[in-house]
Amino acid sequence: MSARTDVKTYPGFFAITLLCMVILYAPLMVVTVYSFNASPSITVWEGLSLRWYADVFTGPESDKFKQAAFNSFSIALIAATLATAIATASATAIVRAGRFRLRLPSLGLITLPILVPEIVLAVATLIFFNSIGFTRGYMTILVAHIAFCIPFAYLPIQARMQGIENTYEQAAMDLYATKAQAFRQVLLPLMMPGIISGFLLAFIVSLDDFIITNFVKGAGVETLPTAIFGSVKQGIKPNIMAISTMLLSLSIMMVTISYFLSKWDNTK
């Protein structure tokens, strides 16, 4: 059997990796740096200042951004909670219920939203709401986000459950616990890092989503991404960079927590 090939030894690997990192993260660094610019111009540097962060909360557009932030966080919280509950039930059925007739099709349907382009999902969701006469607004965004977040919550939960031996539940049932008690008191606590990780991932996906939200939102209903997009159409201003930096920081923090939780082993 041939030895495993280390791709890092290929000529040009480091240069290509560095180029990809620059393309991906240089724009984010520029936005972050200029969010602290004292100048109202986005091209002229006049020193460090927090004025644009204060402007987000007290400036002329603060009411719009506060309402958009409330919509974004409330939708993300509800959508992530319901999506995580559905994902937990789905993972339990697919991983722990053994083989059943619709097991593979069910798994495919759950993970399909990750594979399908988001613009296709947005158009399909809009057509669905229009066909059933569902007035677009806060609820249409919420329903769309719940459906879209399920696979993102499901994957960490499934990975966590697959790493837990079923001997824990068997030992509990040998001690006269019912299946429900074994799940609630043994399996569920062991799954909790994966469940929390899935919740955080679903929350940040919902919070950051723009394409689906922009298609299914009604008139007068804005989330932070759509509010930022609306402001950018009138010209890029430093307060937009400040909001973007805060969203970016929150996303990085929650994804980092989700990553470490998914690696935490509480079965020992």
Image: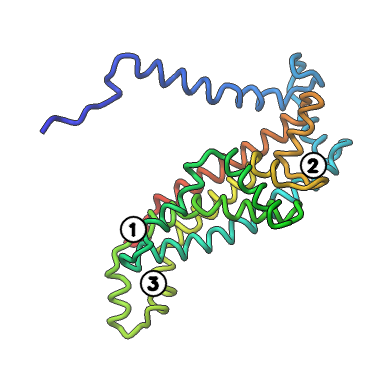
The answer to whether residue 250 is above or below residue 106 is above
CA distance separating discs 2 and 1: 42 Å
- Badge 1: how crowded within 10 Å, few (<14), some, or many (20+)? some
Q: Amino acid at mark 1?
A: Gln
Q: Secondary structure at mark 2?
A: helix
| Front residue of 256 and 92 | 92
Q: Which residue is mark 2?
A: 65
- Residue 104: x, y in percent? 36, 56
The answer to whether residue 79 is above or below residue 92 is above
CA distance separating discs 2 and 3: 44 Å
Q: Secondary structure at mark 1?
A: helix
The answer to whether residue 24 is above or below residue 87 is above
Q: Amino acid at mark 3?
A: Val
Q: Amino acid at mark 2?
A: Phe
**Residue at left 81%, top 45%?**
219
Q: Is residue 259 left or right of residue 31?
A: left
CA distance separating discs 3 and 1: 15 Å
Q: Which mark is residue 162?
A: 1
- Residue 12: x, y in percent? 34, 14
